[in-house]
Image (cartoon, coloured by chain):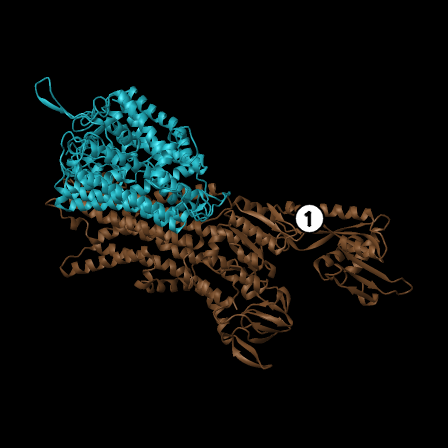
Amino acid sequence: MVSVKSRSKRKMFDKTIIKQAIIDSFKKLNPKHLFKNPVMFLVAVGASLSTFFIIKNIFIGHYSGFTFQIIIWLWFTVLFANFAEALAESRGKAQSDNLRKTRTQTTARKLVDKSEVIVPAIDLRINDIVVCEAGDIIPSDGEVVEGAASIDESALTGESAPVIRESGGDRSVVTGGTRVISDKIIIRITSDPGGTYLDKMISLVEGAKRKKTPNEIALSTLIAGFNIIFILVIITIRVFIEYYQTADVNVSQIVPVPVLVSLLVCLIPTTIGGLLSAIGISGMDRLLSHNVIAMSGRAVEAAGDIDVLLLDKTGTITLGGRMASSFIPEKGVPIENLADAAQLSSLSDETPEGRSIVVLAKEKFGLRGRDITKLDAHFIPFSAQTRMSGVDIHPQNNEIKRIIRKGSADAIKKYVEENGEKFSAGVQEIVNYISKAGSTPLVVSENNIVLGVIELKDIVKGGIKERFAQLRRMGIKTVMITGDNPLTATAIAAEAGVDDFIAEAKPEDKLRRIRDEQASGKMIGMIGDGTNDAPALAQADVGIAMNSGTQAAREAGNMIDLDSNPTKLIEVVEIGKQLLMTRGALTTFSIANDVAKYFAILPAISTFIFAKHLTDGPLSVLNIMGLATPQSAILSAVIFNALIIVALIPLALKGIKYRPEGAASVLKRNILIYGAGGLAAPFIGIKLIDLFITAVKLV
Amino acid sequence: MITINEIIQAIFYIIALIAIAPVLGGFIAKVLNGESNFLTPVFVVLEKTIYKFSKIDPSEEMDWKLYTYALLTFNFFGILILVLLQLFQAYLPFNPQGLPNVEITLALNTAVSFVTNTNWQSYAGETTLGYFTQMIGLTVQNFVSAATGVAVLLVLIRALKTRKGNTLGNFWVDLTRTILYILLPLSIIWAVLLVSQGVVQSFSSYKEITMLEGGKQIIPFGPAASQIAIKQIGTNGGGFFNVNSAFPFENPTPFSNFLELLAILLLPASLVFAFGNLIGAKKHAWIIFGVMLFLFVSGLTVSIISEYSTNNVFNQSGLMEGKETRFGIVNSVLWSTATTAASNGSVNAMHSSLSPLSGLITMFNMEIGEIIFGGVGCGLYGMLLFIFLTVFIAGLMVGRTPEYLGKKIESHEVKWSIVAILLPSAVILLFSAIAMKTNAGLSSLANAGPHGYSEVLYAFSSAAGNNGSAFAGLNANTAFYNLMIALGMLIGRFGVLIPVMIISGGLVKKNVAPASAGTLSTDNFLFAILLTGVIIIVGALTFFPALSFGPILEHLLMGEGLTF
């Protein structure tokens, strides 16, 4: 099975994809399809009128090679726009074909009255129960109800390291299309056919269910407005020219229907009109190549608008767990004793913190892992009531029984004081000192005597500070959410470079913060994975759920990150912004282009006015490009207009370059490239085409 | 050749405008915000009496629909009353000349013209309308049509300022306050100053005098100064006398000329600063003012250069035909540029006699929608529509849903901005085309070729822009032109005004987002360039062909020694 990840590496213009796109661009000539795009519909109507005109003229014995060429290029304009859209779509289709194969070929071992029945995966319904063993492909989305298994999710994420999925808790979600590598699990199906992630991905990639986003609708309105303006201009030009009609000049020969149509086609924003849907489709595509599924295009666009980003500390800003960084003993206790007790208590503590204590003890004091069975040790796991964990070692060789406990300062204090011992002021001082530094103190006691404190440090992810600085330059404020106390939170916030934090955050705190920020007009992005994040994810304008997260979280968010990598939001924001920028830039380019086209077309149709020899009227001074003849001027403008669509397809598909900068510098650069460039490019392009078609005597 | 004196006069005019507008704008902001000001003691009793007498509850807040309904009803009755006054003026008092009832299409045209703040005059003031019609009909509309513009602007300001609200103020209160505290005091000051310069203000009948060479001449009189003050202050422009401010009784001295010239741009420019104060974006207001001033000075410069270039036909520069020798060329084009920039429409020189390129400037000023300062209120709200478009296109380019002053500019705003920009443009292009396709249209032309073409294009540009000035030459007092121009004026006024109200109704409901580094800034030089670019490109793309066949062609033909 082809992994989704490899798609991003595929070449933009694969031969088979181009072939399919060419076929589709003809299929898209269907008026029903064209009607959805007002600009191209108008071009197609114009091209049809002109075609009708030339056929009519052929019947009455007139044929003009010039008119014929114009009509060819008018149709090309439509085809090129169709091609852009088809290309964007077929790139997505090629990607989804593999996914679909998995979907249809998979069978499921459905449990019916405790016996297994083999059924096709596509027949599964919500609440069906299926069994999956090592080697099976999970037939549909579901929840593990029994057992645990390691699962290869590379089909979705491209990540080859298997993940553990088990019943209960936050890691019970499995996704259709992934493969069980070991063990056996029983799964309750949670999606009907068509509603699974795989199905959603397929339809998203193919652009089948693409709805226009709010900004796209607004832009379409603007484009439609320009269409109407230019229709008015063209109709009235015909009348204004007629005002100057004389006995020797017949206006219907100067500006026949095909010429009027080509004027219109040159002026209406065909560039952006032709590329608009390709931009939207490829935006979704780019998002998917970052392994993020967006539930709607609206969410992607909203990502570009985010003002405030709420991030969970753990796993996002810091590495999953805290790491032991030092042992600080109570006065009079040798540091080795503390390290020894700490190591013993952590030997079977599988949490990252526990393991880091063992590692630190080994690194600093050479304490090797000991055989637990020989020690006759009884481990006490962490419990919510005592908020401690530890180990009881039964006496051997006349040693006394060792009762080792580690836990938060409060818990150990309560524990030792209950047993009649003291929690010294010195230890309290160490605890305070560590807290102030932003670390977590873990107090260790043996037989009710406090030995000292382990300092657990949050390890801030490498490079995260730079990313936050990047976000700040983009105008996005970062807020860290943490369950830590304010002291710890302050230190980590400073180290990570976030703008603000919420300490000791409860789910309702997150929700309140989001609501407050929204009330002040801000757009909020939030990344979360736990069930308790679900309300906040739903409330946020952009909620990204980790694929590893709970079902509730995944349903509440409007995007899912298949890699479960929280810093992904930065890429999502960039894609959202890039989408809007590409649309804005091409619109500017398209409209700026018109200036040059006027200077090509207007003199071409008005040189006869007050002319002594038909084409030397005073308005020919407007021919500042020095185009050879009126015919070559019109044809060059139409050809340029059609070719520029093709030329800009790569830009539409890739999106314009994004740099994390403030609005002012982004705008300055885009105006310079697409505004000024849009003014200049057609002057050069039209002149070159004119030189070429005059040289090869096309007109 | 242009003289230093003339250049100094032009510069002095601009400096006076820059100096006075922010100060007056600050005062206007106070008035519009309902704060008490130094005029409150003078007018507050009158204001309260008006509310009491009209049964208006000044604390009643209207949503956009109710506000629009009140405004349209008020304007509808304005037109109706004005039509009736003209139709029956022979039976009304204060008609010492015994002027007859007005023909119905002319009456309708004139009524629409004054209610829409256009003041297009198909009639000749002194030979058509009696004093009663002029004062109760026209002068009243000079006040209320300007105040209507301010009211709509105020609605848009409130819509931009309010967070998630619904109501947009009270039309009757806005109307009353604007008239009492802004228009009336300014008009009184101007009227007194003008009378001091010799502008007539009298109810006596016209005098017939014997001239030196023995011929007879009728000298018209009338309550002119009071109407001229408001016609200039309220960007109305409808002269008391037919030749408007070229007539010595309307505009006797260089100082009166300066006063009237200043009054053209005074309120529109001040409202930009009032807007900045009210919305808390003073720097942004300076940017808007800067863009307007830049466009104004550019147009003025082109006009002056064009007037002073050598005319190939006469081999002479600085032609005085159609201009007042008392004012000279710079004061004439200063006026022609200002009056078309500001939707005023008064003239002190005949625009038909301007050089083709200065004529082009006057037409372009009107065609882009009267937004270079523009009409009172409507100039700024027209400009704001262009700002919405600029913010939208530029906002996309910075990668965010476009925002203006914290309000998201989305499909609703874009759609209605486009409609408001499109409708007047459609009137100019389509109506001109219709006139050129029909005998009814073509038979009114006084000249052939591009000059005749310009007469038509100018007339509809003036109507759609609610300017009211005429190119002269065109015989507009025909049923065809009276009706077409009346329709054009209505579309030009309400085709913009109603979309602005709809936009306001949508904007007021939106939240105000705080600015961040990712937000497009609207108070820097870059935005000024962008806004200027959008205005010129949208204007040029729409009207470049139409203008090429008129003034540009005429200019080129003049170079070949051909005139019309």
User: A376 or A638: nearer the eye?
Assistant: A376
In which quarter of the view is residue B353 placed?
top left
Residue A140 visible from this viewpoint: yes
Three-letter code for the amino acid on which mark 1 is drawn? Thr
Q: Residue at x 45, y 65 (%)?
A: A203
Instruction: Give left or right: position of B390 versus B239.
Output: right
Residue that badge 1 annotates: A488
Residue A530 visible from this viewpoint: no
Residue positioned most to the right: A398
Q: Is residue B332 above or below residue A497?
A: above
Q: Residue at x 36, y 43 (%)?
A: B385
In which quarter of the view is residue B7 placed?
top left
User: A200 or B138: nearer the eye?
Assistant: B138
Residue A581 percent coordinates (x, y): 44, 49
Q: Residue at x 82, y 55 (%)?
A: A416
Near mark 1 (Cα within 10 A), the count class, few <14, some 14-19 or many ≥20, is: many
Tell me the colour chain B is drawn in. Answer: cyan
Which chain is painted in brown?
Answer: A
